[in-house]
Image: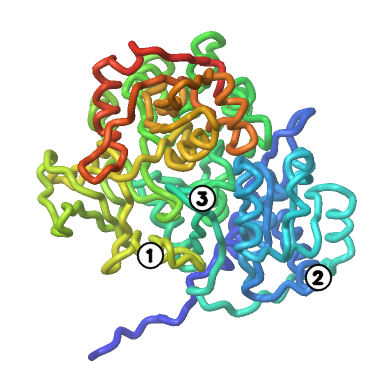
Amino acid sequence: MLEGLMQHDHPLTLQHVLWRMRTMNAHCEVITKTEDGVDRITFGELAARVDRLAHALTKLGVKPGDRIATFSWNTQHHLELYLAVPCLGAVLHTLNIRLFPEQLTYVANHAEDRFLFVDPSLLDVLEPVEPTFTTIEKRFVMGDDEYEALLADAPDTLFEWPELDDRSAAGLCYTSGTTGNPKGVLYSHRSNLLHVMGKCLADSEGVRYGDRILPVVPMFHANAWGFPYACALLGADLVFPSRFVTPEVIAGLIESERVTIAGGVPTVWLDLLAYADEHKPDFSSLRMLICGGSAVPEALMKAFTERHGVKIVQAWGMTETSPLASVSHAPEEDYATRARQGRPIALIEARIVGDDGNELPWDGETTGELEVRGPWIASEYYEDPAGEEKFHDGWLRTGDIASIDAQGSIRLSDRSKDVIKSGGEWISSVDLENAIMGHPAVAECAVIAMPHERWAERPLACVVCKEGQSVTADELREHLVDHVAKWWLPDEVVFIDEVPKTSVGKFDKKVLRTRLAEGELLAQDRQSDASIA
């Protein structure tokens, strides 16, 4: 073999992102919303704080491979940890603040986190569950006197960053996915850097120098879709909303900071649309709104384009895909194509397979399970053999049912497992069923997704009571409060005579979904409370 005479050993690590941030992009800004206005810091000033933080973490004894947890919103301080921790060789573990306590306990202990950094506004959420963490040695509150003292006591000098293998772990995110315990997705430096470069392609999301980007998607959710690293790499200003994620604040930041790209789930843009329709903010700076997490309604795209001159671009991915895998670009008036999940971005391959494992044709009609592979796609879950079925022959089984047309455009049509995706977050139907069936009056329960204008999907509980017993929807919700997160509580409960079964005795949810689509289920005895969300 004749090898090319290239610098093949040059590492693809996030240290390159930090280098560009402190040198050629030092003049760019991070803007963080506060109670009284905004805080501003240049990339160059922030890079100096990252050096101090790295010195401080080293003094604390942080070693390569150690997991450092964060429990925070999108802020400057969170970004400091996004850079210092992985560039030091440790692993950034972003705890999802929306997990309910048992899940937080599991992921922190499963990851064996050593230190925890928390936003002060989230202390009330964290403190009740903190005693269940078994490996965390110390907790720091971001931005308070102790945190600032930690940095002030560190040397005000450039940190000598260690040489890292680009295949070493950089970040850890957990996804609850379907049933059972959350699954850990362990990103590498190489995967994160290549993912960011894929994100910046013109045929992808096209992040570029001079952009001003507002990630509404949380930094605890699949690395905020890679926006923080993309901005640092390319030289785009970052506008962080912190905990102030109301339509009024988002519209105000877009207007005052001249945001060019913003990213969030459909519910964020539905709320922003309602606000914009009433208040008519100036959106003239926006180049696009990136929308992902769940399917984007055509009506939402059309309303933003026709009433506010703003284009929504749909992107698709999962925590396991870092998360960006495909983007849907089409002319503004072609809403049907824009509502698809789009074409895989460069370096990502996709296919659909049938029940027999054979690949199916790309004819836009045939459906099968979607599988993907590429340099930023997970190859297995972290320390979790139970998840092995999701990976085979170098492909990730997404669990989504899809068709692919001749141009490679993906359209998701169903899910192979009965999870519910509400507001961009998964709800496990099986876990919810088990919790409901824990009520003494319930004999059987099947939970399916029902369409929802705002949240895309919400759980519908189909309940069979034990003979001679009864229970109300409100009593079921009261029972569930101690078992699941509040936003999992079913909006509607219908009482049926029996749950349909397959030939092998499993719940046949296909029958229930058909009855729901035909209007039969909701015509039966039901109890609802649309205020639960």
**Residue identifier under label 2:** 60
Is label 2 in a helix, a strand or a loop?
loop
Instruction: State which tag comes first along the sequence, 2 or 1.
Output: 2
Give how far apart the Cα atoms at labels 2 and 3 are. 27 Å
Residue 222: which numbered mark, if any?
3
Q: Position of residue 274 (x, y in %)?
A: 50, 14
The mark that comes first in sequence, 2 or 3, is: 2
**The disc labelled 2 sits on which kind of residue?**
Leu
User: Quarter of the image containing the N terminus?
Assistant: bottom left
- The Cα–Cα distance between marks 1 and 3, rounded to whole angstroms, is 20 Å
Q: Is residue 107 left or right of residue 127?
A: left
Above or below 257: residue 452? above
Q: Could you say which is closer to the camera, residue 210 or residue 384?
A: 384
Describe residue 176's horizontal placement relative to residue 133 as left or right: left
Q: Could you classify mark 1 by the number of other residues whose Cα lies within 10 Å: few (under 14), some (14-19), or many (20 or more)? A: few
Can you give x and y, in whole percent of width and height, for residue 92 in the image? Answer: 62, 61
The residue indicated by pointer 1 is: 388
State the residue at coordinates (34%, 22%): 497
**Please, which residue is most extreme toward the bottom here?**
1
The type of residue carrying mark 3 is Ala
Marks 1, 3: nearer the viewer: 1
Work out how far the residue at label 2 is from the one at label 1, CA to CA, in angstroms: 36 Å
Is residue 357 found left or right of 61 in the rendered image? left
